[in-house]
Image: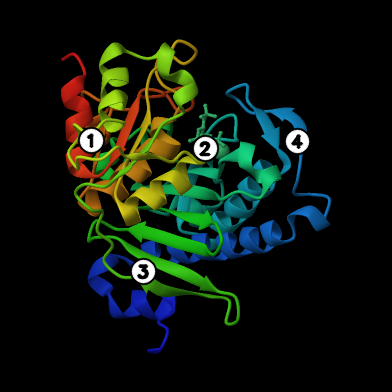
Amino acid sequence: MSKLIPLHDFISENHCDFPSTELSSILGAIEKAGKNISKDIRKAGLVDHILGSKGSQNIQGEEQQKLDVVADLAFIEAFEESGQICGFASEENDNFVAFQNKEAKNATYVVLFDPLDGSSNIDVNVSIGTIFSVYKRISPLGNEAVLEDMLQEGTKQVLAGYVLYGSSTMLVYSTGNGVNGFTLDPESENFCLSHRNMRMPEIGRLYAMNEGNINECEEGLSNYISYCQSRENQTGMPYSGRYIGSLVADFHRNLIKGGIYIYPDVLSAPKGKLRLLYECNPLAFIAEQAGGLASTGRKRILEIKPEELHHQRVPYYVGSKLMVEKAMSFLKK
Ligand code: AHG
Ligand code: MN
Ligand code: MN
């Protein structure tokens, strides 16, 4: 096997991928926290602080798992330590946080993240992940970060990606020059390049939706799902249904194999369930950078102007280009 290329070396060799050293050290912070969480997860059933519920709720009224909070703290600590972040917003925190020290006030970037995606899968040993998104601040350097720094369109992302804690741990990111994937080598404890220039197949044979919601969604979508299950579809064979229930893992599978992931607006979640800032935007950025698409069904995700931090949810159609386009063609304009 050819020599493994650690993330650090890859970054040094690809200056054009990282317009600033600050941005590469933010990725370094994500790498560090991701490794720590990965280690924790590998010990899940053996230690007290990983499995089970925390007994508290986040700002969105969702029950917090212990690992939601552990991961949140690990990433916040790494961001603060990096000195390159003036503020952050996380799914698990009540409000955005502006770091108060002088170094942070002079930092250029903000991070938005979902520390642990797929909480319901933590206790059952199924893949989960961390999703992140980095923006340049709008507010002037030397000041505290403000809400407007967090509420930027997805097109403005300068770095986005995820860490997937699956059968192996992977870090996938883009700075807007394509997508690269790194696998954590348990021996050297380095993320090493394993998936160079990832491209999402234009079409696949997999569809992912929580079909428990099928009677609660718009007619056009249930017609599209019937089309997926028929021989009339673009491949002439019924697609296979695959739904893990961790967006990040469903997305990663479709990125590699080709497929579509759908979380529509449903009666119980009239604007959709997934959060624009913490989940949809970063994965939409990766999807587009890999040749895929991400839409509400009617509008490009990355062009939505965010209006609120926590409660902004959107219907989500993401994946292989031809499949997302086809799904959209079933929806009423
Ligand atoms: P989180 O664990 O960060 O709250 O996100 C859960 C999300 C997403 O990961 C997943 O695709 C979706 O919720 C699953 O929802 P259903 O259980 O309604 O299918
Ligand atoms: Mn999530
Ligand atoms: Mn989460």
At 46% from the left and 28% from the top, the residue drawn is 210
> Does the numbered disc 2 mark a residue whose Cβ is under 8 Å from ligand 1?
yes
Which amino acid is tagged 4?
A: Ser
Q: Please state which of the two labelled residues, at mark 4 or mark 1, is closer to the viewer.
A: 1
Dot 4 surroundings within 10 Å: few (below 14), some, or many (20 or more)?
some
Disc 3 secondary structure class:
helix
Disc 2 secondary structure class:
loop
Q: Residue 28: which disc?
A: none
User: From this viewpoint, is residue 192 visible?
Assistant: yes
Q: Please state which of the two labelled residues, at mark 3 or mark 2, is closer to the viewer.
A: 2
Q: Please state which of the two labelled residues, at mark 1 or mark 3, is closer to the viewer.
A: 1
Q: Are marks 4 and 3 in contact (CB under 8 Å)?
A: no
> Does the numbered disc 3 mark a residue whose Cβ is under 8 Å from ligand 3?
no
Dot 2 surroundings within 10 Å: few (below 14), some, or many (20 or more)?
some
At 31% from the left and 50% from the top, the residue drawn is 286
Q: CA distance from mark 1 to mark 3?
A: 36 Å
Which percent across, then down, holds residue 302? 26, 36
Residue wearing tag 1:
324
Q: Nearer the viewer, residue 283 or 321?
A: 321
Residue wearing tag 3:
21
Which percent across, then down, holds residue 62? 63, 25
Q: CA distance from mark 4 to mark 3?
A: 38 Å
Residue wearing tag 2:
245
> Does the numbered disc 4 mark a residue whose Cβ is under 8 Å from ligand 1?
no
Q: Are marks 4 and 2 in contact (CB under 8 Å)?
A: no
Q: Nearer the viewer, residue 132 or 204?
A: 204
User: From this viewpoint, is residue 159 visible?
Assistant: no
Q: Please state which of the two labelled residues, at mark 4 or mark 3, is closer to the viewer.
A: 4
